[in-house]
Image: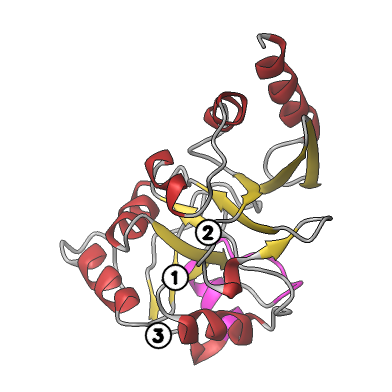
């Protein structure tokens, strides 16, 4: 268990992740379990540890919008204005995936095109860790698939057991609710999961950025 108040906490966590470890980290919503995109075996372990179906891709956490181009070529003005209304924050946006991403983070849209879910957390420690890992990190909720999300490090450990290599105890997550998830079908917003941000707020923001175009 790592105490983030220790000066070396971020360095230790980043080194472990870069070496292929799987780590539990705090975020702005709930605790997450993370692995770097460059370690396929660690990504596979995330599925096994959670009991997550392999057909359900892992979301990617970014440290800033500057790293979006590493995972997706999408980035039009309306999209970025919409994202800016909620990022950093509890919104995962499903976008077209760039070729070459690990299969563990790539899904498929209705027409079979590759997609990737991305978000930027409103959590300074999480952002530091993600930035230290190159600006992108696979992070999914630190609970068994279908189980209750963990708001504390202790809840995450109780759910996942001894299979994780490292746990960063950042106290209780203030959000406690998983991120909302959206995608786009042409100019239409699709709310895949209504989480911390409600459907009404999401649709209102999308309409607002569209009116000026």
- Tell me: 146 left or right of 99: right
Q: Which badge, 1 or 3, comes first in the chain's sequence?
A: 1
Residue at 72% across, 11% down:
211
Determine the CA span between mark 1 and mark 2: 9 Å
Discs 2, 3 touching: Cβ within 8 Å: no
Determine the CA span between mark 1 and mark 3: 17 Å
- Tell me: 110 left or right of 123: right
Q: Residues within 10 Å of mark 3 (few under 14, many from 20)?
A: few
Q: Name above or below for residue 106 compared with residue 47.
A: above
User: What secondary structure is found at the residue carrying circle 2?
Assistant: strand
Magenta residue span: 145-160
Instruction: From the image, tell me which residue sits under label 1.
Output: 37
- Tell me: 190 left or right of 80: right
Discs 1, 2 touching: Cβ within 8 Å: yes
The quadrant of the image that shows the C terminus is top right
Residue at 70% across, 15% down:
208
Name the mark on residue 52: none
Name the mark on residue 165: 3
Q: Residues within 10 Å of mark 2 (few under 14, many from 20)?
A: many
* Residue 181 percent across, percent down from the top left: 70, 48
Instruction: From the image, tell me which residue sits under label 2.
Output: 60
């Amino acid at each position: 268990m790592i105490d983030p108040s220790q000066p070396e906490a971020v360095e230790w966590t980043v080194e472990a992740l870069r070496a292929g470890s799987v780590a539990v980290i705090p975020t702005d919503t709930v605790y997450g379990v993370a692995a770097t995109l460059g370690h396929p075996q660690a990504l596979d372990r995330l599925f096994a540890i959670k009991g997550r179906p392999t057909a359900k891709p892992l979301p990617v956490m970014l440290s800033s919008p500057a790293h979006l181009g590493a995972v997706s070529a999408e980035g039009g003005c309306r999209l970025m204005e919409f994202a800016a209304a909620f990022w950093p924050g509890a919104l995962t946006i499903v976008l077209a995936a760039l070729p070459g991403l690990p299969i563990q983070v790539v899904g498929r849209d209705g027409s079979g095109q590759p997609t990737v879910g991305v978000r930027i957390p409103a959590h300074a420690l999480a952002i530091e860790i993600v930035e230290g890992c190159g600006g992108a990190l696979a992070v999914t909720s630190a609970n068994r698939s279908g189980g209750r999300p963990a708001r504390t490090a202790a809840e995450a450990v109780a759910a996942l057991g001894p299979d994780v290599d490292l746990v960063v105890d950042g106290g209780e997550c203030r959000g406690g609710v998983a991120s909302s998830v959206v995608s786009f079908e042409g100019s239409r917003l699709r709310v895949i999961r209504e989480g911390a941000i409600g459907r009404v707020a999401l649709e209102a923001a999308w309409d607002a950025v569209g009116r000026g175009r």
